[in-house]
Amino acid sequence: MSLWCLLFFAIAFGSLGANDVDANGWPIVRFQNGTVGVQNDGGEVHVRADVMKLHTNVLMLNDIDLMPPKCMAPGGDRLQHNGTHFFCVCVEHWSGRNCDIPPSPPPSPPPPSPPPPYVAPPPYTIPPSPPPFSPPPPPPNALGANELLRVALKECFAKSAAGECECTYDSPCGYITDKSSMNDWDVSEVTEMISLFDGKGSFTANISKWDTSSVTDMKSMFKGCGAFNQSLEYWNTGSVTDMSNMFQNACKFNASIAGWDVSKVKNFERMFNGNIHANTAMKFNGNLSTWNTGAVTSMLGMFSSEGLTLRAGFNNPSIANWNISNVRNMRLMFGGYKQASCGWASSPFNQEISNWNWDISSVTDMSYMFFCATNFRDAGIRKWIVRSDTNTIAMFGQTTLASILVCPGGSNGPPSECYAKPFDTNVQFSEALTQCFVESSDGKCKCATTACGGSGVPISQWNTSGILYMQNAFKDKTTFNQDLSEWDTRSTINMYSMFENAAAFNQNIGAWDVTQVTDLKDMFNGASSFDHDISNWVLPEGAVTTDMFDDADCFKITFDCEDSNDGPPSTCEPTENVYSESCRRIEIGIGKK
């Protein structure tokens, strides 16, 4: 170790004492903090277990640099010792071991942003004047959609009896709309419209766009709306369960509602009823053929015309295929006003309801069903089989049918117990035939415009129970082909030439009772289409059947008889594998029965 270093070491850390060498003759160094060290031959100074050495002119203690750095101005401020070594304290922004690294120059400021493009100010507009009135206060309580609609209607009708009101922002009808027209009101959350326009005789507003999909009850909705006849065709009625009295006394309404979904409706009571208090005529007579009425339980007075001044109302066959399997009440369904003399109180209904595809098995009340439907005359209704507990009081009261049929109590049901009045004489029967063919050349007469000898019913329903002579009845009636299967022939003794040359006739009369008939000569002579089985006919002994089947072409092809022309019928049996182009009803291998 050089003298300078030792001297520095002695000055900085200690001094040599009186015995400045140890037993080996090595110099002893005493530090100011009391540490004693010795220098060996290699120039190393041992301080206890630590080693101090000079390394490339740098004094190191356990590899720690003990040489003070050069702390030079302007970067160096002062030299400072931290207990183990010296270090240079730098002035602000200078760095490095000797504080010889000057501060970096500050970054250049960014260039200024360009000025924004010039935008011309908007033209000056005069602000709108404040409204003359403040908006209406909200309802005193939180009202639902049903109540709000009624508040709006009350305000609207206060302005216009026709409902043609303007809904301004200061009007209560502004609660549910910001539009001026009633047709634009939002009623999508309304669930009931019971009696909504009841008694509004001048109401004519268009409400065709209303969303009624949430409505479940429309009872009496347009009751007494005498002037209303707006389109409701596209209303969604799929949730409605009650339409009773809906159009009662809405006498002008006859708009199409054919597309309505009524599949959930249970109550149709008096839906299109017009009554004596309104003293007006109902005009509705629309097509309702597509309605699904399977859920309906009551049709009480649905189309009744109770006390109308004019004989207008429902008389439409479009309901012939309605599903009425759940209907229990048909009281007064097509009836008029219940009084002794119908007069102006009559109903116009006059349909051949017996041909309708109605299941009446659940109906328990048919009382007054056709009462005062003065033109109703469908005697075929006798085919209706009703329940034993069904009320049929005055079912046919004051109808034409009551004068044609003989019913219990004069006009009561059940229909199956009514029967047509029999002809009093053979002359009357002959007159009826003549009048029938005057009305219709093919015998399809309804006996509505002619008396038909007093029968008053179609030929298929005549009561022939007392007729003795039927000879020549349909002779030469080439187009006649009416159903005579229900004719009562128990008293008949003569059928001579009855169907002679009736070329079109081909009805099943195999059930006729001919046990009294003694003359059947030429009965089917020339009846070329007839091919039904009458082999069950039992004739009295000695009955004449000469040429009974002469020129009865289809019958001869279909059946083999003991005598091809004379029969008799009891000997005729079906042939095998028969076919004829002219006999369309013949099936291969099967004779017609």
Image (cartoon, helix red, strand yellow):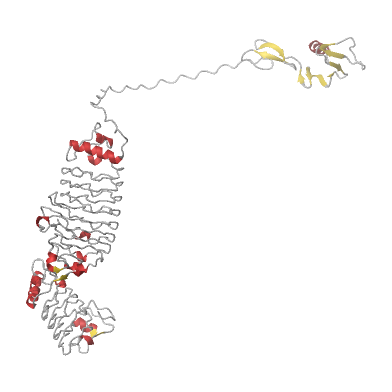
* Residue toward you, 215 or 119: 215
* Residue toward you, 228 or 421: 421
User: Which residue lies most toward the right here?
Assistant: 23
* Residue 510, position as x, y percentages in the image: 21, 79
Q: Quadrant of residue 408?
A: bottom left
Residue placed at 21% from the left, 50% from the top? 245
Residue placed at 28% from the left, 30% from the top? 137
Relative to 200, say whether 82 is above or below.
above
Quadrant occupied by the C terminus = bottom left
Quadrant occupied by the N terminus = top right
Residue placed at 16% from the left, 85% from the top? 548
* Residue toward you, 497 or 159: 159
Q: Quadrant of residue 355?
A: bottom left
* Residue 226, position as x, y percentages in the image: 15, 46
In this view of the protein, can residue 320 be seen by the observer?
yes
Q: Quadrant of residue 370?
A: bottom left
Q: Is residue 10 left or right of residue 104?
A: right
Q: Is residue 90 left or right of residue 530?
A: right
* Figure label count: 0
* Residue 324, position as x, y percentages in the image: 26, 60
* Residue 79, position as x, y percentages in the image: 71, 12
User: Which residue lies most toward the front here?
Assistant: 409
In this view of the protein, can residue 56 be seen by the observer?
no
Relative to 198, say whether 117 is above or below.
above
